[in-house]
Image: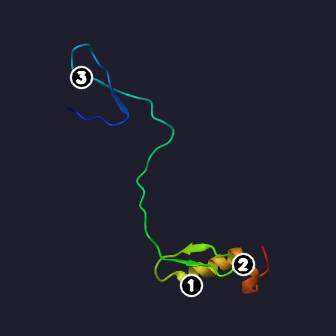
């Protein structure tokens, strides 16, 4: 039995195997391949927010979090 993509639908003829395929309308949502990576995480000691970072980038990511979320802790003027 032939396998068709989910966007195709058989056109059935009485008593015969479907020989033509017609595309159904595609929905507006599309599915794309998704890559999921497990990254190391840490918690901000001020707001207890979980922050994910690439290996070797913890300090850089945490500093950026502090710059955006807690500028006063770095001695910067609030934004």
Q: Which residue is mark 1?
A: 59
Q: Residue at x 63, y 79 (%)?
A: 44
Q: Position of residue 9 (x, y in %)?
A: 34, 28
- Residue 45 badge: none
Q: Position of residue 8 (x, y in %)?
A: 35, 31
Q: Position of residue 65 (x, y in %)?
A: 64, 76
Bin the neighbour count of mark 3 within 10 Å (Cα to Cα): few under 14, some 14-19, many 20 and up: few
Q: Position of residue 59 (x, y in %)?
A: 56, 84
Q: Secondary structure at mark 3?
A: loop
Q: Are marks 3 and 1 in contact (CB under 8 Å)?
A: no
Q: Secondary structure at mark 1?
A: helix
**Chain-order first, disc 1 or disc 2:** 1
Q: Are marks 2 and 3 in contact (CB under 8 Å)?
A: no
Of the 4 image quadrants, the one containing the N terminus is top left
Describe the colour scheme in one phrase.
rainbow
Determine which quarter of the picture holds residue 74. bottom right
Q: Which residue is mark 3?
A: 19
**Chain-order first, disc 2 or disc 3:** 3
Q: Is residue 19 left or right of residue 27?
A: left
Q: How many marks?
A: 3
Q: Which residue is mark 2?
A: 70
Residue farthest front in this picture: 48
- Of residues 60 and 73, the one nearer the viewer is 73
Q: Residue at x 48, y 76 (%)?
A: 40
Bin the neighbour count of mark 1 within 10 Å (Cα to Cα): few under 14, some 14-19, many 20 and up: few
Q: Is residue 5 left or right of residue 74?
A: left
**Chain-order first, disc 3 or disc 1:** 3
Residue farthest top in this picture: 14
Position above or below: 18 against 34: above
């Amino acid at each position: 039995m032939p396998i068709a993509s989910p966007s195709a639908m058989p056109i059935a003829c009485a008593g015969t195997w479907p020989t033509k395929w017609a595309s159904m309308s595609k929905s507006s949502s599309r599915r794309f391949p998704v890559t999921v990576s497990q990254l190391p995480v840490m918690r901000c000691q001020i707001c207890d927010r979980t922050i994910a970072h690439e290996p070797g980038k913890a300090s850089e990511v945490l500093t950026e979090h502090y710059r955006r979320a807690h500028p006063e802790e770095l001695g910067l003027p609030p934004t």
